Amino acid sequence: MSQTRALVTAGAPRRRRVSAESRRASDLLLLIPLFAVLLIIVFPVLWMAYSSLRPASAIAGGITWDTAFSGLSFDAYSRLFAGTGFEHYLVNSIVMCLAGTAVTVVVSALAGFALSRYAFRVKKLVMLLLVATQLLPFVVLVTPVYLFFAELGLLNSYVGIVIVYVAMTLPLAVLLMTGFFNSVPRTLDEAARVDGASTLTVISRIIAPLTWPGIVTVAVTAFISMWEEFLFAQVFLTSDSLKTVQVGLAGLFGEYGTDWGVVMAASVIAALPTIVLFSLLQRRLVAGVAAGAIKE
């Protein structure tokens, strides 16, 4: 009897070791495809940054181990800012996107609070229209919006393009804000109103601090959408002094020749704000998405 117990006791650690090894093997099988997909996604970005440092004559040619790291410099960035006016495009994009993001966050917060807290007859219709706008390709709106803005004198102006950016990002922002506000118990609103708080006070001092990750998610989503927008900026902004980064980047491609080093340098600079913004706020974005999925 004692020998049987000893065999069982000795076999238990062995089974645990076997199960741990099998789990490691299964985890490895999952990680290998994950790293492969990650490499496919990251490689073009790394190649773009690497190409921006190579000499202009070497970009079109082949690459060998002997020439892979020879002649690397920031000369393409110097040429970019020396003769293209790209720094003005960068400032234009930052100003337009920050202004549009601020308006989107404020308006979506107010609209999301109304859809989350109040009941009215056309509430379902409003939600349906907000969802339907996400199914509509914005390219079909270029001509009617262009003619409408031409009548109002809003073409080739900061105000006009900011209005377009807000209109593009607002429906999704309202839907997200509604989901975030739904995760906050209504009892907090009622307690604040008993103490004499107004609607704006409830939003700014009660709900906003509790849904801060969600607000950051909406702001980052709106900013990235505005930063990457090209079509409306290309059509609506005809003055060179008002062009955005994306429009300025497209203008670097020449009809008879292209300085690929400058193009790669401009691409790196155009991608940096979104990469840095997402990297710094990654945790809040994940928390915001999780908060938006919770319902009261």
Image (tube, helix red, strand yellow):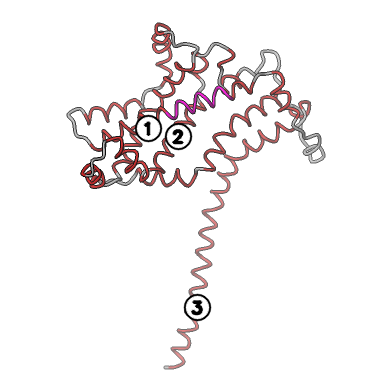
The residue where tag 1 is placed is: 173
Q: CA distance from mark 1 to mark 3?
A: 54 Å
Q: Would you say the residues marked 2 and 3 are in contact, meaning their CB atoms lie under 8 Å apart?
A: no
Crowdedness of circle 3 by 10 Å Cα count: few (<14), some, many (20+)? few
Q: Which residues are magenta?
A: 91-102
Q: Is residue 216 found left or right of 241 in the rendered image? A: left
Secondary structure, mark 2, is: helix
| Foreground residue among 158 and 68 | 158
Q: In terms of secondary structure, what is the magenta stretch mainly? A: helix
Farthest residue to the bottom: give it. Answer: 1
Residue sitting at x 39%, y 23%: 167
Query: Residue type at mark 2?
Result: Thr
Indicate whether 24 appears above or below 69: below
Is 263 left, or right, of 289 in this rendering? right
Q: CA distance from mark 2 to mark 3?
A: 50 Å
Pointer 2: what residue? 221
The residue tagged with tag 3: helix, strand or loop? helix
Judged by depth in the image, the label closer to the viewer, 2 or 3, is 2
For label 2, count other residues whose C-alpha is less than 10 Å away and answer few (under 14), some (14-19) or many (20+): some
Count of numbered circles in the view: 3
Taking 182 as reference, is 71 above or below it? above
Judge whether 28 appears above or below 90 on screen: below
Looking at the picture, how far across and down is residue 61, in whole percent? 76, 28
The local crowd at label 1, few if under 14, some if 14 to 19, many if 20 or more residues have their Cα within 10 Å, is many
Mark earlier in primary sequence (1, 3): 3
Q: Which mark is residue 13?
A: 3
Q: Residue at x 36, y 43 (%)?
A: 211
- Residue 181 image offset from top left, x and y in percent: 31, 41
Q: Nearer the viewer, mark 1 or mark 3?
A: 1
Task: Work out whether 187 lies above or below 247.
Answer: below
Q: 134 or 247, which lies in front? A: 247
Query: Residue lying furthest left in this view?
Result: 121
